Image (cartoon, rainbow, N blue to C red):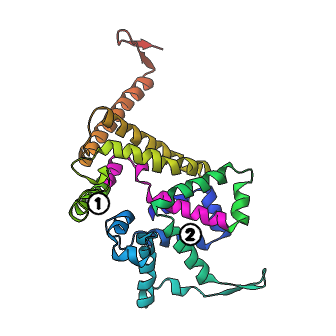
Amino acid sequence: MKNVKCFFDTEFIRYLGKIREWTWFISVMAAAIHDMGHTGQTNNYHIAVRSRLALLYNDKSPLEQMHVSAAFQIMSENIDTDWFGVFLKECKVSSKKEMMQIQGRFRRTLIAMVLATDNLRHNECVEKLTKLISSDEDVYTALTSQAETRLLVLETILHGADISHPTYDLSLHINWSSKVLEEFWAQGDLEKEVLGAASMPMFDRDKMDVPGAQVGFFKFIALGLWEPLCVLLPEMQCRLEQMRRNLDYWNNRKENGLLVLPDPEEVLNEQEEDSDQLDQEGEETMLCEDETMLCDDAGGKPLDV
């Protein structure tokens, strides 16, 4: 939810919020429910073992289908949670001389946004986004005139927020990574028990190359979406730059043969030490400037200016 809010602080998404005021609220709600009731396993696992969810939703995004369905079921069963019911079902639009189906539109948008967080849809999302930013048509014009463009943008920012932990400060990113990996390894343990072997090396806690898996995720998933997204939303460029710094960190660990997950606390302490060192160097530089003196590189002796 916090990351979706960050997107709405950009000029382009603020414009979307002006021409369709309800998109802000629906986006926040989509973020709130997009992982509701998650089982801790992937869609592929559910499909492989023919779980209740896979059978219920015919192998089509079973988790995402469940998330949004469960949210609406709760609202239908408990009036105190039914934020959806506060909206009118329909409203007459004088300019079009027709009835607008408010609840129907909101529900369709919410469902589409949550289903778009299935990573199976990732390449489709990137292709559509790339086409949008490469088009000769002005993106603001497309956003104003095309419902499919507005939906694409909403789907993209939720998907971008969902995979945004690579854009966090390094220690926080590693903390998130450790939680994700523990979930993967728990699934791998379950796969060994149920299927006889882990379905992928990244799910096997005994074999996983942590930095290698991270580098792969950055290059083929995170950067693939965030690079064109930052063309559309240049205010998010600083997040993309942090992602690239984090990628450098994982590449360095891989090159040095450090294949295990680093301790987030140790990384945080290292960052604080580096920050203290930079602050100290900054203070020394300021002192030197205040006294209008420069240091001679050869002898380290101050020179009068």
Front of the two marks 2 and 1? 1
- Name the one closer to the observer, 175 or 109: 109
* Residue occupying the point 39% across, 13% down: 297
Q: Secondary structure at mark 2?
A: helix
Q: Earlier in the sequence, mark 2 or mark 1?
A: 2
- Residue 252's x, y, as percent? 34, 34
Which secondary structure, mark 1?
helix
Work out which quarter of the rendered image holds the N terminus and state it.
Answer: bottom left
Q: Is residue 100 left or right of residue 97?
A: left
- The residues bearing labels 2 and 1 have C-alpha atoms spaced at a distance of 31 Å
Going by the numbered disc 1, the residue's amino acid type is Glu
**Where residue 170 appears, x then y in whole percent?**
36, 45
Name the amino acid type tagged 2.
Answer: Trp
Check the image and report above or below for 181 versus 46: above
Q: What's the residue at 34%, 77% (across, down)?
A: 52
Question: Could you tell me what secondary structure mostly forms the magenta stretch?
Answer: helix
| Res. 183 mark | 1
What residue is shown at x 65% (from left), y 52% (from top)? 131
On the image, the x and y values in percent for residue 84 come to 51, 83
Tell me if 2 is positioned left or right of 250 in this view: right
Q: Can residue 161 be spotted in the picture? A: yes
Which quadrant of the view contains residue 55?
bottom left
Residue extent of the magenta highlight: 148-177
Query: Foreground: 280 or 246?
Result: 246
Report which residue position mark 2 lands on: 24
Q: Is residue 78 visible?
A: no
Give residue 79's quadrant in the image: bottom left
Q: Residues within 10 Å of mark 2 (few under 14, many from 20)?
A: some
Q: Is residue 164 magenta?
A: yes
